[in-house]
Amino acid sequence: MMKNKTLFDKIWSNHSVGYRPDGKELLFIDRHVIHELHVPHAFSRLSKTQHAIHRKDLTVIVQDHTVPTRDGIELISEHIKVTREHAKNYGIQLIDVSSAEHGIVHVVSPELGLALPGFTLACPDSHASTVGAIGCLAFGCGTSELEHILVTQTMVMVKPKQMRVKLTGHLSSGVGAKDVALKIIGMLGVDAGKGYAVEFSGPIIDEMSVEQRMTLCNMSIEWSCRTCIIAPDHKTIEWCSSRAQTPKGKDWDEALNYWKGLSSDEECQFDKELSIDCSSLVPQITWGTEPSQVIDIGERVPFAPGLNSNLSFQYEKAMSYMGVSPGQDLKELSVNRVFIGSCSNSRINDLRDVAKLVKGRKVASHVKALIVPGSTATKRQAEKEGLDVIFKDAGFEWHKSGCSMCAGANGEVGQMGERCISTSNRNFENRQGRGVRTHLASPQMAAAAAIAGHIVDSREFLETL
């Protein structure tokens, strides 16, 4: 193993297989996971060029974005139909809607062991870096890049600069990974990570579960990081040990030996280093139309900066869309809809946190609240633990796995003017339905709003448990 290297350097060097005259490198991709929104165009191009797929065994297709998650809805999108046809014609593994392994691509990739420590992974979706939580170096790719990977099993890239973000202190009760992620975006801005591969480290990371780390890594794209990664530890190894495609026997011993060396060396150098103390962190909630427009719960909506006309315009535009005013306290603001799901917060730990808060309580009569597990396996586990009963007794809709309201490409959207508390990763205008006003928050903050009928500090509910 190389000395004085970052974790990123170690994985990158092990997968770099060539250089181009323009300075870009060819990076071998261990796993290529694709969702149905990008399959039709990319595979149509393959048909026209008559290129062969280089490593079918390293490619998996997942149906998630256009999948209806409501019971009794059998709508099959054109994307789903065409994806099935291409998967069959090309002989590629397909995790279809009815599969016992079905789920959101960024949830099932680590869940099945498609993503593992030390691997490289590519996915035509911006939140590919979710699996950086287990020490897998993952990159989002475009449709043309997708085609290149299919044909060569390599991705053409400029090596990013590197940043280490050390998270210190300890999280208070009722504060989680989503709050950490939103706080970072609010502090640094949506462009702070542009051009960087980020490594998260520090006591907060050590305390987090693997699933919580996935939430943090998922949200790194919202401050423009090229990718992010966390060094695998004993939690990672234990989590990966039971996955279907985890190496077995002697291969496991070799993998384990490799994984134990996957950390940044003490003398390694980063292009930039940040340290963020999370000791005083409280639950976060967005007020505007991008993740950086976020405040502490109980803090007031900020006044638009007067010196920067462009930033002032952005603030005013966001406030107009969201129906909020400078100096306003978001608490007590009535809520119409609550969505708990997406690749950010739909794993079993998220559902357990929600169940703890809503047990024995009822969703407010004017609120439509839905919970969408990130995978069929997560859904089975939740039902085994009786969490679904708690949710339904409280008045939540319990859905099948899929992207649901996060993507909005499946008929699952809010109505014009509705105010929605969402655990997804983006609150852009019209993202969850035309004219829908989306506030991003943690699962417990979303659940508390569903019960109260308005935005509320979730810790008020947790204190009474």
Image (tube, rainbow, N blue to C red):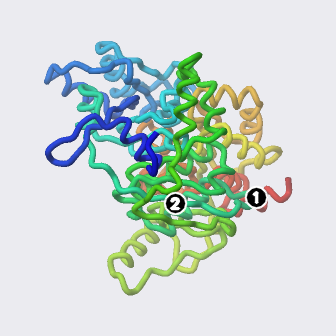
Q: Position of residue 173 (x, y in %)?
A: 76, 58
Q: Position of residue 318 (x, y in %)?
A: 43, 68
Q: Amino acid at mark 1?
A: Ser
Q: Is residue 101 visible?
A: yes
Q: Please tell me whether mark 2 sits on a helix, a strand or a loop.
A: strand
In the figure, is residue 6 to the left or right of 49? Answer: right
Task: Check the image and report above or below for 74 versus 418.
Answer: above
Crowding at label 1, few (<14), some or many (≥20) Cα neighbours within 10 Å?
few
Q: Earlier in the sequence, mark 2 or mark 1?
A: 2
Decide which of 106, 73 is in the foreground and name it: 106
Crowding at label 2, few (<14), some or many (≥20) Cα neighbours within 10 Å?
some
**Residue on which the image places disc 1:** 173
Q: Residue furthest right?
A: 464
Q: Quadrant of residue 50?
A: top left
**Residue on which the image places disc 2:** 165
The mark found on residue 38 in the picture is: none
Task: Give the residue drawn at x 38%, y 23%.
Answer: 58
Decide which of 442, 57 is in the foreground and name it: 57
Q: Amino acid at mark 2?
A: Val
Task: Give the residue drawn at x 33%, y 76%.
Answer: 310
Q: Are marks 2 and 1 in contact (CB under 8 Å)?
A: no
Q: Position of residue 441 (x, y in %)?
A: 59, 56
Q: Position of residue 299 (x, y in %)?
A: 62, 74
Q: Please tell me whether mark 1 sits on a helix, a strand or a loop.
A: loop
In the figure, is residue 21 to the left or right of 78? Answer: left
Label 2 and label 1: CA atoms lie apart by 23 Å
Q: Is residue 69 visible?
A: no
Q: Nearer the viewer, mark 2 or mark 1?
A: 2
In the figure, is residue 193 to the left or right of 388? Answer: left
Task: Give the residue drawn at x 44%, y 61%.
Answer: 290
Task: Give the residue drawn at x 52%, y 78%.
Answer: 302
